[in-house]
Image (tube, grey):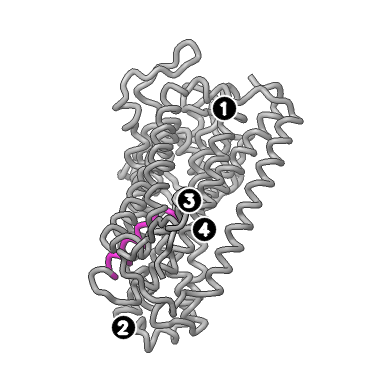
Amino acid sequence: MIESDLALLISRLDFAWITTMHIIYPPLTIGLALLLFFTEWRWMKTDDEQWYRLTRFFEKLFIINFGAGVATGVTMEMAFGILYGPFSQAAGPFFGQILGYETITAFMYEAGFIGLMIFGWGKISKKMHLFATFNVMLSSSLSAMWILDANSWMQTPTGVEFKDGLFHVTNWAEAILNPDFLVAFPHMWIAAVELALFFVAGVSAWYVLKGRHVALFQRALKYSILAAVIVAPLQIYLGDDLGLTVKDHQPAALAAMEGHFETYNADGQPNTGWHIIAWPNDAAGKNDWAITIPYALSLIETHTLNGVVKGLDQFKPAERPPVLIPFYSFRIMVAIGFALFFVALWGAWLAVRGRLTVENITRNRWFLRALIFSAFLPYLAIWTGWWTREIARQPWLVYGMMTTAEGVSHMSVGEAIFWLIGFMFFELGVWFGAWYFFAKVIRKGPDMDSPIVEGNEPLGHLEAPSHDENADPAYVRPA
């Protein structure tokens, strides 16, 4: 057990800070890798220069984002050992192996092909380069899959038994394919694609609004927003599916997300009201005030008008999560999901009316401004979604099996503050560095003058001086 509640609180804040700063990078890496594969594939199929320019431009932003993700990801894995030593030791038989698979995927598979993708232009064939980009896309998704699998296991731990201070795996299939993972990973993966689509659309809208490279970025904007018409409602559907899983396997977490304190009303009927907005009062065990829609909660969670949804009164006070943050962060995430869907519909309506053509797109200035603003919304949705997920799981670190207090490292308040300041300093450095280079690349814009590489260019050769047999050979680059 940790020495004091204050040290526990600081350690929790520290890890919350680390994950909050890290989680904004991997989703863009995953989604942007998919879009890079698409644009490069289109270039190969059509030999259209604009697809090539778009690929090379967004690849620069991808590289910056990837680097920031690696830096903050390594920090997070360090934090597991520093801040959550007892948990890392106890969960090692499962957690350690899953993170090992992620390491193989990320640092061997992904990193190798990223090298080819970045430095292979003109050095390998076009088909081989596309193959490298495809593998970057695939490996980044696999890396995310293993990470989310580890986190999902913490949400719904199956296939293990907790014995002698260790989580022993009794069934690997059940542990890996735990109930939360089967819906949480598709939800997160689509979130990554949606983020990348609005990121590309937002950057493109900025160029169009400025009147720079309009023909080039009109294409990126139009394809992104039309893809978002499909992706945005799919994400809403997957979010609803994940909510049903939370109801079945983490009912206390769902009750916190909905500010649902009482299972039944005073007349004995199920409490079916869904609170649009409220002010939860944990100490009093009720909402101080709320705007409520009758029957809506049962309709959403049980698909019936009078279905029973467990309230927080069904759980011991010590096992109830805090309510205020999950309640509002969940609503912000849902509101952003619908807002992005409506922005996508707006774009589709303009496209159907012929107002997203190169000649007309600059006339839609409010739509372009909305797209720039929308580029930041998926980040906020991912943040608030993650806060909902992690805070609503409390007080459990491994749901129903190990509390957060049991998994935190033995640490004094001074040591906890030291690590908090250290991690904050590092993460902020990465943050400012990443956004500085993002802004620099975007301000400069795409390179429209360099020749298009065709691949299979000679790499050069080693040549020894003819007058001295013992001299070292020299590397000769082709002219």
Q: Nearer the viewer, residue 190 or 472?
A: 472
Disc on res. 472: 3
Say what amino acid the circle numbered 4 marks. Ile
Q: Which numbered disc, 1 or 3, marks the residue closer to the eye? A: 3
Mark 1, residues whose alpha carbon is within 10 Å: few (<14), some, or many (≥20)? some
Q: Give the magenta part as a residue range.
A: 28-43
Mark 4, residues whose alpha carbon is within 10 Å: few (<14), some, or many (≥20)? some
Task: Say which residue label 2 marks.
Answer: 353
User: Does 352 sit left or right of 451 as displayed?
Assistant: left
Q: Earlier in the sequence, mark 1 or mark 3?
A: 1
Say what amino acid the circle numbered 1 marks. Thr
Q: Residue at x 51, y 49 (%)?
A: 69
Mark 2, residues whose alpha carbon is within 10 Å: few (<14), some, or many (≥20)? few
Give yes or no for contact between labels 1 and 2 (Cβ–Cβ under 8 Å): no
Q: Is residue 335 magenta?
A: no
Task: Say which residue label 1 marks.
Answer: 404
Mark 3, residues whose alpha carbon is within 10 Å: few (<14), some, or many (≥20)? few
Measured as percent of width and height from the top left, residue 277 is found at: 53, 52
Task: Say which residue label 4 marks.
Answer: 64
Element assignment for label 1: helix
In the displayed structure, would residue 321 be above or below residue 478?
above
Q: Earlier in the sequence, mark 3 or mark 2?
A: 2
